[in-house]
Structures are given as C-alpha cells and as structure tokens.
C-alpha cells in the first residue's frame, strides 16, 4: 500500500530564486525536530489554487526519501505536507 | 478506393502510462519501481494506471490492488493527484499549441496536432522528437511520450501505439498494409471484443481482411449503417473522425466507501454529487431539464429513475430536490450511486417566465455562492448535510473527457 505520511509541519527553507523553468529552487529545509534535509532533485513543481490564493507544491527528494513541501505565495510560508521513504 | 496518398500531416501525442509516469516524475524514489495509481486507499480498490515496470509483471488497468500486489511484490500504490495531472495536461497542451493552431486534446494524456495549412520548415519526425525533448525539459526528465504520424487521426493514433514506451512511428500509404499485418483486430482503436466478434461472424479475423473488405459489404452486411463506410475510409487513411460533439449530459457517480451506510448517510452523499454536478453544469454555462438517478446494488443489479421538468434549472438545490425524490424508490444494499442532468441547453434563453422573480432570486443566490467558492476555494459554502462527505468524496480525474480540466 501507499507509504506516504501526511504532515502539516511549518519548516524553514533555504531557497534560490533565479531564472529558467524552475525559477524558485528550494535547496535545504529544516524540520521542527531540527533535522536538516538537502534537496537533491525537484521532481515536479505544480501550482494549486485555493480560491484566489496560490500554493506552489514542490515534490522533492534528498536521495533517500520523497517529500512534498508547499509554498503559500500569499503568506510566503513553507510547510512540509508529505513524506515517503518507500521502504517495503 | 485506393489508400490516401496525401502527405501525413496529423500527429498524435500520447503520454505513456500518464498518471504513473507523472507520479514517478514527481517522486524520484519511485522511478524504476512498480507503481500503481489508485483512487482510494483501500485494499479493494482498482488500479487506475500502472507503471511500465508493473505492467511488465502482469499488472493491468482495472485489476484489484490485492491481486496486482501478488503479481508484482513491492508494488507501491499511490493515490491519484488530479491537480498534478491537470498541470502536466496544461503543459502538454501548451507545447502542442506552439506548433499549430489546430490542436485537439482527446483526453488528459493525449492530443492531436493537425498541420494542414501550417507552414513547417522541417519534417514531422523532427517535430516529434522535439516534442519529446521539450516534454522532458519543461516537465521533467522521466516524462516520455509516444508520437504517431499519419494522414488521418486513426492512423496517427495507431502509429502512436506501435512501439511503447517512447516510440515514434509513421503510417502512410506506403507501409499501411505491412503495419496492419503485424496487428490484431483489437489493436485497432474502436475495435473491442464485442466488435471483434461481430467482424469474426462475417469471416474477418485480421486487420488485413478488414482492409480488403469492400465498402458496400461493410456498410450493408457488417455494420448495416454508414459506420461501415466510415470504417472503409478510416482504414485507408481518409479523415472521418474530425467531428465535435456537444455536451449531452453532465453527471457524476460514487462507489460507497462502506456498505453499512444508513439511508440518511447515502442521501448526504447523493446531495454531495448534486452539488458537484450543479457546479459542473454552471461552469459550462448550461441549464438542464432532466435528472437521472441510478443505483448499483451489491448483487450487481442496476436501478434507475428519471424525471423531465417543464422549467429548466441549474441550482444545486433544485437538482438535489428532484434527485432525492427520485431516490425514494431506490432498492436496498446499495454499492454505487450516480446522478446526471440531461436535456441540456445553453443558459441564454430569452423566454420570459411567469416565475421570473422566484428564478431571479435563485439566480442571485447561486451566483453569490459560486462567487464565494471561486474566491476562497471549492466547497467553502455548501449544504450542511454534506459537511462530512468531503473526506470521502474527492474529485478524481477521468481519462476520457477534457471538459472539466
């Protein structure tokens, strides 16, 4: 079955805003337990409208687990909402 | 009639195992692993899409997850994520639209580009490879698509299915027979098991025999309608499928999450469906005059009830009132419920009604609620009895129509 864990955790994120197809690139984030995770790849970034508020969803990995982090474009806050390590 | 010798100017682009590939793209740890996309997190759920790794192990679309996980140990089930698929759909559509103004998206994962009248300074094969590259660059490195080129939509789609995944093929008058020789009847789009039996009954067992059957025989003996002549032309590369059709019905169905639900709980789920159907109806600027309610029982029996009204309607409240009245006669042991509105017309009827003030009040109320929901998100305002249903009844994306994307 699905091995995702659903979370709603406020996180601190080091992000680079540049150009190209992915102008916003999260590089590293710190969870509330102090653990730091280095983003090695952004799988997909897609926007999700919540009414007129836009949330940008980043599906990322650190090479050992997949994470979903969400940037609220109105409040400029980041949240960790999913984690999956795919261990059988 | 000879084969169509016109230059092949129709391109069919088809994402490979679309939902599963998008999941593998967005979650890199899933790449190279058996993945099944499901609509609900239960053991009895059916598989919506399987990745190529899972398909290699014998997993098929529509199979129960428990059965599939026996075939492919370690199969990872991922719940479908419509927002993500809609994003990739829009990306694909924007790529295809950059080559021609004549693009038709046939479903969430496939589109057709018509190059007739479009000045092109390179071959369609080069454009096909460029589309594949742009999909990888603009969406992600794990994205793959099949490209088929042909003189009509049918042959372009057939070509797109020849070498999966990530193939690019052309079918035209020069290789049409040789390609048909490699296919079975059911490999042709539009020929499923029922149609295959019908063709077998008149001694047509292969696509080549189908191709060699005359137009009159197909029309008078096999199909007994104009459809026979259309197949005769379609198989030879002539375009017969460039038609558009109007929306005839708007509906939604739901398989109950639990078989022990009370009638009150089922009625709340029906109300949720009515709100969803009303929203879709208004989003397409339509009004309806009929409501059709259906039920499928645990014993696989089908029950339905319908009503046509004299006055057209479009509000959630009216749809729900009619549906709940129809639903009173429904049998017990319900497994699936569904509702659809029919006899649709555009919401621009200038006819003056005797009940104008009543209708105007309803119109103001409905447009105010829709405005709030547009601004603050879907289902910000909804009826009180559907308060707990959103947890189970999530919007899912179907493969078929692109009307609601």
Image: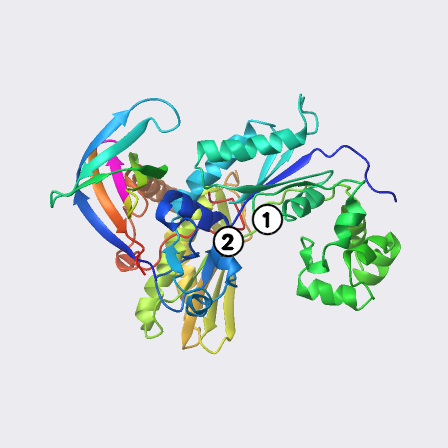
Residue under the point 61% across and 43% down: B167
For residue A32: magenta?
A: no
Query: Residue sitting at 32 percent across and 45 percent down?
Result: B378
Mark number, residue B15: none
The answer to which image quadrant residue B130 occupies is top right
Say if mark 1 contacts mark 2, CB within 8 Å: yes
What percent of the width, then of the height, locates residue A77?
Answer: 19, 34
Q: What number of labels is visible? A: 2
Image: magenta residue range: A68-76
Q: Residues within 10 Å of mark 2 (few under 14, many from 20)?
A: many
Image location of residue B189, percent across then percent down: 67, 53
- How far apart marks 1 and 2 lie (CA) works out to 9 Å
In this rendered view, identify the residue nearer to me: B155 or B314: B155
| Quadrant of the rendering where the C terminus of chain A is positioned | bottom left
What is the crowding at mark 1: few (fewer than 14 residues within 10 Å), some, or many (at least 20)?
A: some
Q: Tell me: residue B324, above or below residue B396.
A: below
In this view of the protein, which residue sits in the foreground, B79 or B287?
B79
The answer to whether any part of residue B194 appears in the image is yes
Residue B365: % across, % down: 33, 43
Residue located 11% across and 42% down the image? A34
- Assign the N terminus of chain A to one quadrant of the image: bottom left
Sequence-first disc among 1 and 2: 2
Please tell me whether residue A69 belongs to the stretch shown in magenta.
Answer: yes
Residue topped by disc 2 = B52
Q: Is residue A47 left or right of residue B138?
A: left
**Residue A50 shows up from this direction:** no
Label 1 secondary element: loop
Q: Is B203 situated left or right of B317 in this image? A: right
- The residue where tag 1 is placed is B164
Q: Is residue B8 left or right of residue A6?
A: right
Instruction: Specify the subunit that label 1 lies on.
Output: B
């Amino acid at each position: 079955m699905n091995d995702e864990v659903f979370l709603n955790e406020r996180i601190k994120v080091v992000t680079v805003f540049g150009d190209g197809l992915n102008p916003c690139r999260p590089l590293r984030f710190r969870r509330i337990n102090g653990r730091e995770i280095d983003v090695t790849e952004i799988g997909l970034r897609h926007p999700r409208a919540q009414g007129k508020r836009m949330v940008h969803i980043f599906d990322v990995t650190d090479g050992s687990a997949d994470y979903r982090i969400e940037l609220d474009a109105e409040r400029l806050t980041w949240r960790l909402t999913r984690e999956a390590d795919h261990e059988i | 009639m000879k084969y169509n010798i016109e230059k092949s100017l129709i391109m069919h682009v088809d994402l490979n195992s679309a939902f599963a590939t998008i999941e593998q793209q967005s979650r890199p740890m899933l790449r190279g692993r058996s993945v099944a996309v499901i609509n609900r997190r239960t053991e009895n759920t059916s598989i919506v899409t399987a990745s190529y790794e899972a398909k290699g192990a014998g997993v098929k679309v529509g199979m129960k997850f428990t059965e599939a996980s026996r075939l492919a140990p370690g199969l990872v089930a991922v719940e479908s994520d419509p927002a993500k698929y809609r994003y990739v759909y829009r990306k694909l559509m924007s790529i295809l639209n950059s080559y021609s103004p004549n693009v038709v998206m046939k479903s969430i994962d496939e589109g057709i580009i018509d190059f007739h009248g479009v000045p092109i300074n390179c071959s369609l094969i080069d454009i096909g490879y460029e589309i594949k590259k742009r999909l990888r660059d603009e969406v992600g490195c794990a994205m793959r698509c099949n490209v088929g080129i042909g003189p009509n939509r049918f042959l372009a789609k057939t070509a797109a299915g020849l070498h999966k995944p990530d193939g690019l093929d052309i079918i035209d008058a020069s290789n049409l027979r040789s390609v048909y020789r490699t296919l079975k009847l059911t490999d042709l789009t539009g020929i499923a098991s029922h149609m295959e039996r019908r063709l077998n009954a008149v001694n047509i067992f292969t696509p080549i025999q189908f191709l060699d059957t005359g137009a009159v025989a197909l029309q008078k003996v096999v199909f007994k309608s104009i459809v026979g002549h259309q197949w005769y032309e379609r198989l030879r590369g002539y375009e017969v499928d460039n038609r558009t059709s109007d929306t005839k019905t708007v509906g939604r169905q739901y398989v109950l999450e639990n078989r022990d639900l009370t009638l009150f709980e089922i009625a709340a789920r029906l109300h949720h469906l009515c709100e969803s159907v009303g929203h879709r109806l208004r989003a397409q600027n339509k009004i309806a005059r009929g409501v059709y309610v259906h039920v499928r029982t645990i014993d696989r029996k089908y029950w339905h009830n319908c009503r046509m009204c004299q006055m057209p309607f479009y509000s959630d409240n009216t749809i729900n009132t009619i549906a709940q009245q129809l639903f009173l006669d429904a049998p017990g042991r319900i497994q699936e419920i569904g509702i659809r509105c029919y006899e649709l017309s555009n919401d621009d009827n200038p006819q003056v009604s005797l009940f104008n003030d009543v209708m105007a009040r309803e119109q103001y109320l409905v447009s105010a609620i829709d405005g709030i929901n547009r601004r603050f998100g879907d289902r910000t305002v909804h009826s009180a009895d559907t308060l707990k249903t959103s947890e189970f009844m999530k919007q899912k994306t179907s493969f078929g129509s692109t009307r609601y994307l």
